[in-house]
Protein backbone atom coordinates (compact mmCIF):
# COMPACT_ATOMS: atom_id res chain seq x y z
CA UNK A 1 0.00 0.00 0.00
CA UNK A 2 2.68 2.55 0.92
CA UNK A 3 4.97 1.68 -2.00
CA UNK A 4 4.20 3.08 -5.43
CA UNK A 5 6.05 1.76 -8.46
CA UNK A 6 7.35 4.19 -11.06
CA UNK A 7 4.39 3.36 -13.31
CA UNK A 8 1.78 3.45 -10.53
CA UNK A 9 -0.17 6.41 -11.92
CA UNK A 10 -0.07 5.01 -15.45
CA UNK A 11 -1.59 1.79 -14.07
CA UNK A 12 -4.36 3.45 -12.04
CA UNK A 13 -5.32 6.19 -14.52
CA UNK A 14 -7.69 4.09 -16.71
CA UNK A 15 -9.63 2.76 -13.70
CA UNK A 16 -9.73 6.20 -12.08
CA UNK A 17 -11.06 7.90 -15.21
CA UNK A 18 -13.67 5.18 -15.70
CA UNK A 19 -14.68 5.55 -12.05
CA UNK A 20 -15.04 9.31 -12.46
CA UNK A 21 -17.32 8.84 -15.49
CA UNK A 22 -19.53 6.47 -13.51
CA UNK A 23 -19.46 8.67 -10.40
CA UNK A 24 -20.68 11.65 -12.42
CA UNK A 25 -23.61 9.59 -13.70
CA UNK A 26 -24.42 8.33 -10.21
CA UNK A 27 -24.27 11.86 -8.81
CA UNK A 28 -26.70 13.11 -11.44
CA UNK A 29 -29.04 10.16 -10.93
CA UNK A 30 -29.16 10.24 -7.11
CA UNK A 31 -28.42 13.89 -6.34
CA UNK A 32 -25.26 13.19 -4.33
CA UNK A 33 -22.08 15.21 -5.00
CA UNK A 34 -18.80 13.85 -3.63
CA UNK A 35 -15.67 15.86 -2.93
CA UNK A 36 -12.45 15.53 -1.00
CA UNK A 37 -9.82 12.90 -0.35
CA UNK A 38 -9.50 9.60 -2.20
CA UNK A 39 -7.15 6.60 -2.12
CA UNK A 40 -5.89 4.70 -5.15
CA UNK A 41 -4.64 1.18 -5.65
CA UNK A 42 -3.29 -0.67 -8.66
CA UNK A 43 -4.56 -3.89 -7.05
CA UNK A 44 -8.36 -3.69 -6.68
CA UNK A 45 -8.31 -6.85 -4.54
CA UNK A 46 -6.96 -4.61 -1.76
CA UNK A 47 -10.41 -3.03 -1.61
CA UNK A 48 -12.35 -6.30 -1.42
CA UNK A 49 -13.54 -5.51 2.14
CA UNK A 50 -14.26 -1.81 1.51
CA UNK A 51 -17.53 -0.50 2.88
CA UNK A 52 -18.89 2.99 3.34
CA UNK A 53 -20.49 4.48 6.42
CA UNK A 54 -24.22 4.90 5.91
CA UNK A 55 -24.66 8.09 7.97
CA UNK A 56 -26.26 10.45 5.46
CA UNK A 57 -26.63 13.18 8.11
CA UNK A 58 -22.86 13.57 8.61
CA UNK A 59 -22.06 15.20 5.27
CA UNK A 60 -19.17 12.74 4.84
CA UNK A 61 -18.70 9.54 2.90
CA UNK A 62 -16.15 7.54 4.86
CA UNK A 63 -14.72 4.27 3.57
CA UNK A 64 -13.35 1.66 5.91
CA UNK A 65 -12.18 -1.94 5.81
CA UNK A 66 -9.68 -1.64 2.99
CA UNK A 67 -5.95 -2.44 3.11
CA UNK A 68 -6.59 -4.31 6.36
CA UNK A 69 -6.53 -7.83 4.90
CA UNK A 70 -5.09 -7.28 1.42
Image: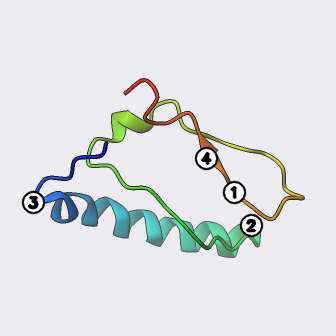
- Relative image position of residue 17 (x, y in whole percent): 35, 70
Report the residue marked by disc 2: 30
Report the residue marked by disc 3: 6
Q: How many marks?
A: 4
Q: Residue at x 34, y 41 (%)?
A: 44
Residue projecting furthest to the left: 6
Residue projecting furthest to the right: 57
Distance from Cα at disc 3 to Cα at disc 1: 30 Å
Distance from Cα at disc 4 to Cα at disc 2: 19 Å
Sequence-first disc among 4 and 2:
2
Sequence-first disc among 2 and 3:
3
Q: Residues within 10 Å of mark 2 (few under 14, many from 20)?
A: few
Residue 61's disc is 1
- Relative image position of residue 52 (x, y in whole percent): 66, 44
**Which image quadrant: the N terminus?**
top left
Report the residue marked by disc 4: 63
Q: Label 4's element?
A: strand
Residue 26's disc is none
Sequence-first disc among 2 and 1:
2
Q: Label 3's element?
A: loop
Q: Residues within 10 Å of mark 1 (few under 14, many from 20)?
A: some
Q: Residues within 10 Å of mark 4 (few under 14, many from 20)?
A: some
User: 34 or 30, which is in the foreground?
Assistant: 34
Sequence-first disc among 3 and 1:
3
The answer to whether residue 38 is above or below residue 4 is below
Q: Of the residues tagged 2 and 3, which is closer to the observer?
A: 3
- Relative image position of residue 9 (x, y in whole percent): 21, 64
Q: Label 2's element?
A: helix
Distance from Cα at disc 3 to Cα at disc 4: 26 Å
**Which image quadrant: the C terminus?**
top left
Sequence-first disc among 3 and 4:
3
Amino acid sequence: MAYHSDDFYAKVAPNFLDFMDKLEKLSRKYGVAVYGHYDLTDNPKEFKNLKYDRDYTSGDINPHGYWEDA
